[in-house]
Amino acid sequence: MQAFLTIAVRAARKAGDFIIRESDKIRSVQSKSQHDYVTNVDQAAEKLIIDTIAHSYADHAFLGEESGKTGTSEYVWIIDPIDGTTNFIRKVPHWCVSIACNYKGRTEVGAIYDPIREELFTAVRGRGAQLNGKRIRVSNTNGLEHSLLATGFPFRNKQKLEQYMSVFSKLYPHCSDMRRAGSAALDLAYVAASRYDGFWEFGLNEWDIAAGALIVKEAGGMVSDIHGNPNYEQSDSLLAATPKAFKSMLKAIN
């Protein structure tokens, strides 16, 4: 799987550099749904990523946020060319490229690249997680009292707002503070790098979380839906945290 990571990193860096160069050349902004946008740069970056990977693995399948599912294979590359598109459009410097490789339904490789900060978060299943080539681990924060949590609003699914506010009201009084920065992939990477102690959100897609969830787990964290179900891929929610914060968050929520 190390060879797959090498390709993922190559594709992520190429896409990140391309996006930076094209950031002042946004020619179109389309609304996929209310508050959910795509630009010509997203679409071109996704094509660049797919072309880069397909050059080495032409028989693999792809699941991209912008192009959907293409091909049939036990290997599926899951791609979010710009996670945090609204931030990108508004020139808020907090977005990333997220790439994962799934084999027989299990994520084996993950890469999240923030080209603005030149930070590359990576993981291979069973081999730990890294930031710019150095091993990272989740924090050792004990429980929720001193924890910094991250979240995302259910902007794609407003009917989840009441449930979201219920969970927020159960967690916020017990933690140090809460952040909402606008990129789920980076939120997960920050949990892995011990910048956050936990993250939770409703209404995420596979391309939002595939790479980040693996990176959290390989950094020693735990991932489930907000009810503790480990099959979060089939759920409408995600919770990722350090082991101690994870248990405290589930207890507070449920």
Image (cartoon, rainbow, N blue to C red):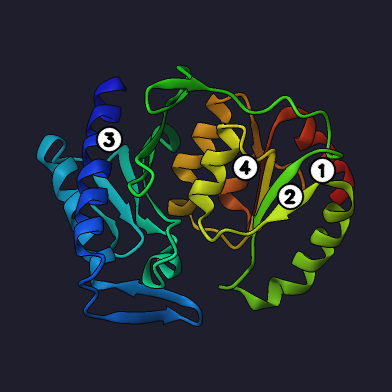
- Closer to the chain start, of discs 4 and 1, is 4
The residue indicated by pointer 1 is 250
Q: Residues within 10 Å of mark 2 (few under 14, many from 20)?
A: many
Badge 3 amino acid: Val
Q: Which mark is residue 9?
A: 3
Task: Work out which residue is located at the far top of the displayed protein and give it.
Answer: 127
- What is the CA distance from the residue labelled 2 to the residue labelled 1? 7 Å
- What is the CA distance from the residue labelled 4 to the residue labelled 3? 27 Å
Vertical arrangement, residue 246 with respect to residue 151, above or below? above
Quadrant in which residue 169 is drawn: bottom right
Badge 2 amino acid: Ile
User: Which mark is nearer the camera, 4 or 3?
Assistant: 3
Quadrant in which residue 244 is drawn: top right
Between 195 and 97, the one lying in front of the other is: 195
- Closer to the chain start, of discs 2 and 1, is 2
Task: Work out which residue is located at the far left of the displayed protein and give it.
Answer: 55
Q: Position of residue 176 (x, y in %)?
A: 81, 46
Q: Position of residue 200 (x, y in %)?
A: 67, 51
Badge 1 amino acid: Leu
Q: Residue at x 40, y 75 (%)?
A: 37
Between 173 and 62, the one lying in front of the other is: 173
Q: Residue at x 71, y 42 (%)?
A: 229
The residue indicated by pointer 2 is 226
- Closer to the chain start, of discs 3 and 2, is 3
Tell me whether the residue at label 2 lies in contact with that at label 1, contact meaning CB atoms closer than 8 angstroms: yes
The residue indicated by pointer 4 is 231
Badge 4 amino acid: Asn
Q: Residues within 10 Å of mark 1 (few under 14, many from 20)?
A: some
User: Which mark is nearer the camera, 3 or 2?
Assistant: 3
